[in-house]
Image (tube, grey):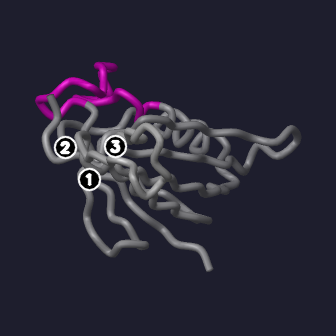
Amino acid sequence: MTFTATISSTGGTFESSSSAVLTLYDVQSEDVRKTSGLIEFPMPTMDSNGKIVMDLMGASREITIEGIVTTADVPEIYKYARDIAGLQGASGSNNTLISGAQGSAFGQFTYNSYTTSNTIFVVVSEASISSEQGNPESKKYSITMLEYGTLI
């Protein structure tokens, strides 16, 4: 079963449209990974149960979605490819390229996850789109996002 998801821009529209919502067609997979920034200190002459583990960094969530967009309208698929590529560090009116690490809504998005059934505030850490030779009507895409609470 495949899904359709959306990414909404906090501060502007996407490069190829006047909309602040980008539809992610035919999502094949959504991988949600939560990791902790644990630091471990083995105790001299002790077994592993004598280890000290400290949580100094907290936890982070990374979401990777992969999908395929297919349309007979080839110029439209190229516009879509620009929108996917523009997610990383994109913001403002028609995706003025500004570092996604900056605050003030630049590069910040909301993503509607079907795995967690939540709306998540994200920044895009990686976005890619690929095509196969001889198949201009179909593009595969992959987007990796990091959940955030406060962006500085």
Q: Residue furthest bottom?
A: 1
Please tell me whether residue 29 belongs to the stretch shown in magenta. Answer: no
Query: Do the numbered discs 1 and 2 sit on residues whose CB atoms are within 8 Å?
Result: yes
Tag 2: Cα neighbours inside 10 Å, few (<14), some, or many (≥20)?
some
Tag 1: Cα neighbours inside 10 Å, few (<14), some, or many (≥20)?
some
Residue at disc 3, secondary structure: strand
Which amino acid, mark 2?
Thr
Which amino acid, mark 1?
Thr
Q: Magenta segment, which residues?
A: 86-106
Residue 133: give x, y in percent of width and height.
86, 38
Instruction: Please report whichever mark, 3 or 2, sits nearer to the chain's N-terminal start.
Output: 2
Q: Image check: 24 left or right of 78?
A: left
How many angstroms separate mark 3 from mark 1 (CA)?
Answer: 24 Å
The C terminus lies in which quarter of the figure?
A: top left
Q: Image check: 99 left or right of 33?
A: left
- For residue 110, the mark is 1
What residue is rendered at 39% in x and 53% in y? 50
What residue is rendered at 33% in x and 75% in y? 117
- For residue 129, the mark is none
**Label 3 vs label 2, nearer the camera:** 3
Residue 16 seen in render: no
Instruction: Please report whichever mark, 1 or 2, sits nearer to the chain's N-terminal start.
Output: 2
Residue at disc 2, secondary structure: loop
How many angstroms separate mark 1 from mark 2 (CA)?
Answer: 7 Å
Count of marks placed on residues: 3
Query: Which residue bears the numbered disc 3?
Result: 37
Q: Is the magenta region chiefly helix, strand or loop? A: loop
The N terminus lies in which quarter of the figure?
A: bottom right
Query: Which residue bears the numbered disc 2?
Result: 10
